Image: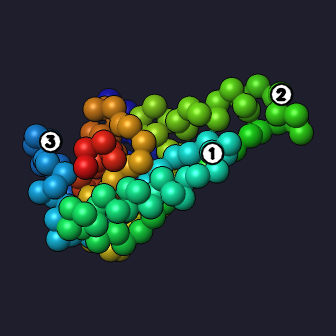
Amino acid sequence: MRLHPLSVYLHFHVRVPALRRGAPQASAVIAGTDVLIAGLFSAKRKDYLASMDAVAESVIRLGGRVTGRFVQRRGNSGNKKGNAPGGRRNMDRPYSRRTLMSTGKIREIAEARAQHQAEAVVFYNELTDHQRIVLAEIIGCAVFSRHDL
């Protein structure tokens, strides 16, 4: 089995606790703890800050404290008309099927989680079960989608 380079980096540079078995309830994990929020948005979407504010309000309503926000915007590549392959077509797609966001952004979230000792990360985006497992392993805490709140 080949390890993801980001997993190797984080296991040596960021203390990653063992994952808890079973899916914890968001309300039980978030209440009274520090929480990070994150979201991947298309560059076409102009209301992404309001969406992040809505996630923050949900965390606060459950008794959590938002200690960091991470936004990744998927922009338009190519020429001025945006006709290059991979440009406009991919704006609404995740950077990675495994981690949703780029490895650099996930590394940034993991380092902030360790620094703030956050107990959870809540993503604006819907996450697959596989993404939840991989992100929880890399980041080192419970990972939720806004739909779990």
| Badge 2 or badge 3: first in the primary sequence | 3
Q: Residue 23 carries which label?
A: 3
Label 1 crowding class (10 Å Cα cut-off): few <14, some 14-19, many 20+? few
Q: Which residue does the image show at 88% across and 34% down from the upper left?
A: 81
Q: Quadrant of residue 83?
A: top right
| Badge 1 or badge 3: first in the primary sequence | 3
Image spot of residue 56 (x, y percent): 37, 62
SS at mark 3?
loop
Q: Which mark is residue 75?
A: none
- The answer to whether residue 71 shows anywhere in this view is no
- In the rendered structure, are the residues bearing label 2 and label 3 in contact, judged by CB atoms less than 8 Å apart? no
Q: Residue 83 carries which label?
A: 2
Q: Which residue does the image show at 55% across and 52% down from the upper left?
A: 48
The kind of residue tagged 3 is Ala
Q: Which residue does the image show at 56% across and 32% down from the upper left?
A: 93
Image spot of residue 31 (x, y percent): 16, 65
Image quadrant containing the N terminus: top left
- In the rendered structure, are the residues bearing label 1 and label 3 in contact, judged by CB atoms less than 8 Å apart? no
The kind of residue tagged 2 is Asn
On the image, numbered disc 1 is attached to which residue? 45
- In the rendered structure, are the residues bearing label 2 and label 1 in contact, judged by CB atoms less than 8 Å apart? no
Q: How far apart are marks 1 and 3 (CA)?
A: 31 Å
Image spot of residue 88 (x, y percent): 72, 31
